Image (spheres, rainbow, N blue to C red):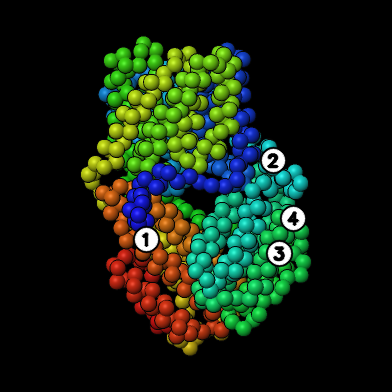
Amino acid sequence: MSRSVLSLPPWITHALRAQRGPVPWAAVGRGALAAGPVLVAGMAVGRTALGVLAAIGAMLAGINDRPGSRRASVKRLGVPALAGAVGLVVGTAAGERVPPLALTLLFTGLGLVAGCVSAVGPVASAAGTQVLVAAALGAGMPVPEPGWARALAFLAGAAWLLALRLALPTPGALAGDFRFDGERTAVADVYDAIARLLDAAGTADARARRFALTAALDHAQDALTGPRLRRWASSAAERRLHAQYAAALPLAEAATALAWAGDPVPARAAEGPRRLAAAVRAHTPSGPLPAPSRDAPGLRALDDALLHAAQTFDRGGERRDLHTRRRTVRSLLRTAFGAGGREYGPRVAPSFGAGAGTAQALHHSHWYGQHAHWYWMPATAVFLVKPDLGPLVSRVLCRAAGTVLGALLFAAFAAVLPRPGGLVALVAVCGALVPVATRHFAAQTAVVTVLVLALVMIGGEPQASVSRIAETLLACGIVLVAGHLPLPGRRGGQVRARLTAAGDAAGAYLRHVLDGVDDLGGSAGREGSAGRGGAAGREGSAGRGDFAGPHRPDDHDHDHDPGHDRTTRWTLRREAYRALAEARTAIALAAAELPALARHSAGTDEVAALLERLVDTTTACAVHLDDTGRLTPHLTGRLAEDLDELAARGERLGDRVPRTHPAL
């Protein structure tokens, strides 16, 4: 039988795909110490209901407890928890004072806003999810305590897990510097990714290795970004780590240029970055580094970058900027209520509102029984409808299968476990399994279902496995209908919004590199990189508006400052590659939808590939200009070819992309 007959459609294969990697034992330990202890604490003081809410807060924080640094976890866990506390207050007040029809309309409006905000990014998406889930809990889980007490209990549970994240070391951390949990590993991974890209230069694996380098740089950026957890911890060691990350940027640029050239490089070229990676992990000087040959611009740039990195490792360094995106309030609002937000919000709103309305109708018809809670259906709809959590049908299939499995498992456990001790132990075990179960949505759903059913039974609700299965299936039906409604607005809006952002970033980067290049013979008013400062920086950074880099050039102070020019260039380069990675993720999710939805983003993967090629070519041009101050006909020809192909597709790259240029 042919392979094409056996192949499954993307919307099925995505549902079967699970993430891989080592077991996050540190997160498993935190999960075991999170929900169970706060539940026991609430029971010990006679506030079981508040203990249940605290355990739910810890569980939701555990879902967001992903690999990364301590400082990054403050925002990743803290912001969604604060949003959830607000949702609890709003939901509690509305559930006590607002009639069912008005409550349904209120929840629909709340879903619209939360869905739009989710388009901003992963943390905003997690916050939008928790505010809706917590609002459903506040309105649909009757508890005698007031809303502010519920919110404090919810925050206490999340804060307890965050405290564990900040205080407990990860395996192996005690052997090194305890202050840097994920930061040092993230920076070392960047150097390893550079070495692997150099190894793959001239082979078919080069493109995938360049993607891996972008992911490593993104992860290191996120790991080093965030609050200084202790003021005294901002020591020479922290400044040194920032300088080591900054020293990797010219190496990454040179490696990308060499991979773009398509020629194999000497094996010893990758040895230097590998030794630097080992030095970062061991917190030691770099030692002698093998110098690569210098017979090409890319190799000369790599050699210069290795020399600079060796000096940085040996003498430490000042705290360097991380070349992160500085987004203004205007740009955040534009993203939330732009094409992506307008696609998210109208899907989340009817799903959440219909789930709440249907649940209340069933509640008043005594479907649930006299004392049961009705939060399950709207909360399930929230997790199902969020477009950034995966393709729609994949989420529905996984949620249905996971709920059925989890409900049946809980029914079996409830029949044999002693109460309440056995159920408390079950909560602790499920809390430990959450970090592992997040690798697959069905597994996560099964674990969370068992955990929540155990919590509500401890809180006084009778065994409700059958009704939870029925409610989940109803929520699946609601979300499938809402997800395919012909609502106003262009489908594929989130994908095209990401592509537009990537095009803007690529255009800003290209303008910066080419600014001052007036013809094939060289640059206007400079020789080599000696004069590539002020004008390029003004066009490349100041012209980028809302997505400005942290180094905004000054029209008077930075003219003819090559160091400042390169800093701006690396900021724009990081922005371009990061925006492209986000676009690729959105395209991959859209491609795994049902054909009726996937067709709206057809062809966008080819546009993303063209943009990536343009950015790679721009990087090669930057390295060549630094070396010779000139653009070769080969480079200008490739740039013109890339721009012509993009223009032929009619794709908007942004107002600042030069469609024509004297050098082209």
Q: Which quarter shows the N terminus?
A: bottom left
Residue at position x 62%, y 54% in the image:
186
Q: Looking at the image, is mark 4 or mark 3 earlier in the sequence?
A: 3
- Asked if residue 42 can be seen in this view, the reply is no
- Circle 4 residue: 282
Real-space Cα separation, disc 4 to disc 2, in angstroms: 17 Å
Q: Is residue 581 left or right of residue 289?
A: left
Q: Looking at the image, is mark 1 or mark 4 earlier in the sequence?
A: 4
How crowded pointer 1 is (Cα within 10 Å; few <14, some 14-19, many 20+) is rated as some
Helix, strand or loop at mark 2? loop
Does 642 sit above or below residue 11?
A: below
How crowded pointer 4 is (Cα within 10 Å; few <14, some 14-19, many 20+) is rated as some
- Circle 1 residue: 605
Does 96 sit above or below residue 175?
A: above
- The reply to whether the C-beta atoms of the residues labelled 1 and 4 are less than 8 Å apart is no
Does 262 sit above or below residue 459?
A: below
Q: Which quarter shows the C terminus?
A: bottom left
Real-space Cα separation, disc 2 to disc 1, in angstroms: 41 Å
* Residue 275 tag number: 3
Q: Amino acid at mark 3?
A: Arg
Q: Amino acid at mark 1?
A: Asp
Helix, strand or loop at mark 3? helix
